[in-house]
Amino acid sequence: MQRERLIAFGCELGQGYLFSKSLEPAAASALLGQSAQEDRHTA
């Protein structure tokens, strides 16, 4: 429900446990790198 409200307000970015549990720095970097790489493949 909160996610839908944020989308309705035009929020394009989010953070928190809804999107991912807490990660160690190396795991967070790997996750962000993977996401960026996927974005490049879909563009």
Image (cartoon, rainbow, N blue to C red):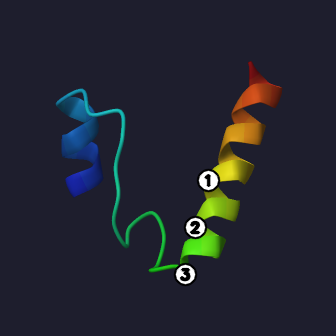
Residue 6, quarter of picture: top left
Relative to residue 14, is residue 7 depicted above or below? above
Query: How far is the residue under mark 3 from the one under mark 2?
Result: 6 Å
**What residue does disc 1 label?**
32
Q: Which quadrant: the C terminus?
A: top right
Task: Determine which residue is flagged by label 3.
Answer: 24
Give 4 or 35, whichever is nearer the viewer.
35
Residue positioned most to the right: 41
Crowding at mark 1 (Cα within 10 Å: few <14, some 14-19, many 20+): few
Circles 1 and 2 in contact, beta carbons < 8 Å: yes
Q: What residue type is labelled 2?
A: Ala
State if disc 2 and disc 3 touch (CB < 8 Å).
yes
Quarter where residue 15 is shown? bottom left
Residue at x 46%, y 78% (from the top left corner): 21
Label 3 packing within 10 angstroms: few (<14), some (14-19), many (20+): few
Q: Do the numbered discs 1 and 3 sit on residues whose CB atoms are within 8 Å?
A: no
Q: Is mark 2 on a helix, strand or loop?
A: helix
Left or right: residue 9 versus residue 41 is: left
In three-dimensional space, the C-alpha distance between marks 1 and 3, rounded to whole angstroms, equals 12 Å
Give the class, few, some or many, for how many residues have Cα within 10 Å of label 2's Cα (few <14, many ≥20): some
The residue under label 2 is: 28
